[in-house]
Image (cartoon, rainbow, N blue to C red):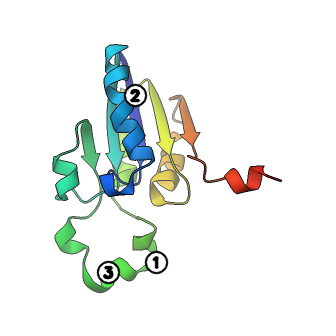
Amino acid sequence: MIRRLRIISGVDPREGGPIEGIRQQAPHHAAAGIEEHVVSLDPPDAPWVRDFPLRLFACGRPMAQSGGWRRRLPWRRYGYSPHLVPWLRAHVHEYDQVVVHGLWNYATMGARRVLVGAKVPYVVFSHGMLDPWFKR
């Protein structure tokens, strides 16, 4: 059994794209002997977290703490959570491989802070975010 950790900014199905790909691939990976877990910046009390079909570790602030002026702070729009890096440091060695999904959010930065030098193989999947650059 291979254990894979997926790091992504959020698992809200309204965001579509990468998270839907993870959801659709998971049964096929499980059949091939790959156990997948997900860590995200979602609030742990979000309804989409409760209903997520894979083992999920939501490291964001609870929704009750995320409202009002706080969500307008630049580092909050970026997805900053003080819980992500400590969680990754404590658990990343439990996995055989890691996939970091997306760019330009705190999930990616937190992953970089932990994975570089962690001796756990990882890849970064940009999900087309650099496509216009490749047209040149």
Looking at the image, is 31 positioned above or below residue 67?
above
SS assignment at label 3? helix
Residue located beneath label 3 in the image: 70
Tell me whether circle 3 and circle 2 mark residues in contact (CB < 8 Å): no
Which residue is denoted by mark 1 in the rendering? 74
Judged from the image, the secondary structure of the residue bearing numbered disc 1 is helix
The reply to whether residue 90 is visible in this rendering is yes
Label 3 sits on what residue type? Answer: Arg
What whole-number distance in Å separates the C-alpha atoms at marks 2 and 1? 31 Å
Residue 22 in picture, x, y percent from top left: 39, 37
- Measured in 3D between alpha carbons, the distance from the residue under mark 3 to the one under mark 2, in whole angstroms, is 33 Å
Please name the residue shown 44% across and 45% down the image: 18
Mark 3 vs mark 2: which is more N-terminal?
2
- The Cα atoms of the two marked residues, 1 and 3, are separated by 9 Å
Q: Position of residue 126 (x, y in %)?
A: 58, 46
Check disc 3: other Cα within 10 Å, few if <14, some if 14-19, many if 20+: few
- Label at residue 4: 2
Q: Position of residue 30 (x, y in %)?
A: 32, 20
